[in-house]
Amino acid sequence: MVVDDDTETREALAEELESHGLRCLTAEDGREALDIMRHGQPQVNAVVLDLMMPVMDGWQVLARMRTDDSLRDIPVLVISAGDPRAFSALPPWQRSMKKPLELDSFLRTVDAMLEEAAPVA
């Protein structure tokens, strides 16, 4: 799932992920993203999350995901074009990338997140 209030960014990232062979849901703010993750189908296996959004920002989404048993294990890639110091407030284990994203690195990171989230057979 790609969560970003910027329509152009959200659609471009979703298109790249789909051309990479992945099915991609989108949301324009954190509230919509949480609603889809909790009640939507299909299941969300990874999230690309912008930090700076109206209605509910990425910080609030991360906080709610960490306290929700059904969402806490979904890997998240935080993205932001804002102040790079914001990344220093993230836990050291949290994946993050500064916008504009380098496409190859972005796709490798998403692939790693999906591999990490895959159930062990």
Image (spheres, rainbow, N blue to C red):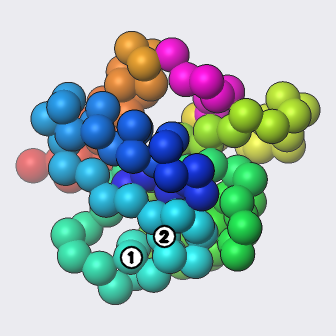
> Could you tell me which secondary element the residue under label 2 belongs to?
helix
Instruction: Look at the image and tell me whether residue 14 can be seen.
Output: yes
Q: Using a 10 Å C-alpha cutoff, classify the residue at mark 2 as few (fewer than 14 neighbours), some (14 to 19) or many (20 or more).
A: many
- Which of 5/120 is in front? 5
Q: Position of residue 49 (x, y in %)?
A: 56, 50
Q: Is 18 left or right of 51, judged from the image as shown?
A: left
Question: Does 14 sit above or below residue 65?
Answer: above
For residue 33, which numbered disc appears in the image? 2
Q: Using a 10 Å C-alpha cutoff, classify the residue at mark 1 as few (fewer than 14 neighbours), some (14 to 19) or many (20 or more).
A: some
Asked if residue 21 is among those painted magenta in the image, a careful observer would answer: no
Q: Is 21 left or right of 113, judged from the image as shown?
A: left
Question: Which residue lies at the image location 49% right of the left edge and 43% below the top edge?
Answer: 8
Question: Which residue lies at the image location 38% right of the left edge and 76% below the top edge?
Answer: 36
Q: Which amino acid does label 1 sit on?
A: Ile
Quadrant assignment, res 35 = bottom left
Q: Do the residues labelled 2 and 1 touch (CB within 8 Å)?
A: yes
Q: Give the range drawn in magenta.
A: 96-102
Number of marks in the image?
2
Quarter of the rendering occupied by the N terminus: bottom left
- Judging by the rendered image, the residue that carries numbered circle 1 is 36
- Which of 99/77 is in front? 99
Question: Does 92 sit above or below residue 44?
Answer: above
- Measured Cα–Cα span from mark 2 to mark 1: 5 Å
- Which of 30/37 is in front? 30
